[in-house]
Amino acid sequence: MEIKNSKKLLSEIDSNLKIIFNSSALLNKLKDETFEDVVLKQISILKFIEKKAKVKESDADLWIKKLNDINGSKREFIELNYSNQDDIVDDINYLSVYVQNMFKKPLSEFKKDDIKLNISSNDNKTVDSKVNDNMNANPMVPPMFQNGMGNQFNSPENYQLWQNEMQMMVARNRLQQMVNTGEFYQYKTKPLIIRIIKYIISGVAIGLALISILIGIFLLLSNGIKISSAGKEDVLTINYFTLISQIIYALLFLWIGYIFLKPLKNDNQKYSYNKFLGYMMLIIIIYFFFSQITVSFLYQNISIVESNSQQKIGFNGFIVCNFIQVGLFGIALIVNILGLVFSPKPDIERINAKLAQIMDELKSGNNKDAAKPN
């Protein structure tokens, strides 16, 4: 099987392995056999591609030696046999997925530790010697971190870690600004259905707000009306709990309608679905249905309307609006679920790549280039 873009794949694996062996957190995790197996497979994939690409000097040999030295083991390359390049790419990407699930942060965030590895096919040094050389290096620690309040930074390693954490924080803030201004699009797709769903949700939300206001008005108008139900006559009195609930519904849905309808500044806002509002609407709708909508509730109200068709408009209007409200809540439930389902997924790889680019630009001092969109 011929491997396309073999240099790119080799570079990606090599970069990932450098991150792992540069990070004390990931190095400690190598004691876990499962993680060790994942890393070993990455090294074996590197060896597989090197053979196919006929690379003369193998970096994979250096990496497996380093792995065995760290764990005191004698692991050997896994025999791999790929027939499809997509399978190779999937296995390479699995490392990032595994680290993300294990540490709850992407692999690229570990590019900030104390050991600096730099291996290449043109360098005859072993990985061990390079680690030792870099660990023996003594970068200058600024005087402000040498005494007093800065005792926690009194070693080059701690200072370097602090510096990288600060750079990562700056990079995250800068990326967030680019997302907010629309310079960087953070999702994988731009689903048009989300824009349609937003318009429907805003319309339904405003409709629910108006219906809630009408229900409150009709509730007040029906106070004191005599009605007959099941052969008995009753006098309606104001249910203050229902009145307060309708006022809350009206305010909430006016706000939700405004949020979904307000002008959107960029594609990140246009094609994303506000999950906080989505889940809040689910809670409101579920509460509404469980607290008010039952078969007996519907049957009882239909019977009362039929028995009191000549009554004042206040009472009948109250009942009719209740049924309209039920229908609108049902529409809101369906459309809201569709919005949550079709909401675009963040493009984690692209986000991490942009963060890495900004970090590199910060380290090189070229801040303008870091702000350019992808």
Image (cartoon, helix red, strand yellow):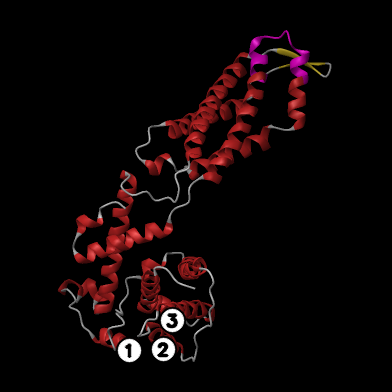
Left or right: residue 342 compared with residue 162: right
N-term-proximal mark, 3 vs 1: 3
Distance between the Cα atoms at labels 3 and 1? 20 Å
Q: Is residue 284 above or below residue 359?
A: above
Q: Which corner quadrant of the image does residue 9 belong to?
A: bottom left
Type of secondary structure dominating the magenta stretch: helix
Q: What kind of residue is marked 3?
A: Lys
Range of residues picked out in magenta: 303-319
N-term-proximal mark, 2 vs 3: 3
Give coordinates of residue 17: x percent, y percent.
Answer: 39, 76
Left or right: residue 143 compared with residue 256: left
Query: How many residues crowd mark 3 within 10 Å: few (<14), some (14–19), many (20+)?
Result: few
Identify the residue shown where x is 40% and y is 87%: 61
Residue identifier under label 1: 126
Residue identifier under label 3: 51
Q: What kind of residue is marked 1?
A: Thr
Give coordinates of residue 159: x percent, y percent.
Answer: 25, 74
Residue identifier under label 2: 65
Circles 1 and 2: CB distance less than 8 Å? yes
Left or right: residue 327 compared with residue 24: right
Q: What kind of residue is marked 2?
A: Lys
- In magenta stretch: residue 357: no
Question: Which numbered disc, 2 or 3, marks the residue closer to the eye?
Answer: 3
Identify the residue shown where x is 73% and y is 33%: 294
For the view shown, which residue lies furthest in the left direction?
A: 143
Give coordinates of residue 31: x percent, y percent.
Answer: 48, 83
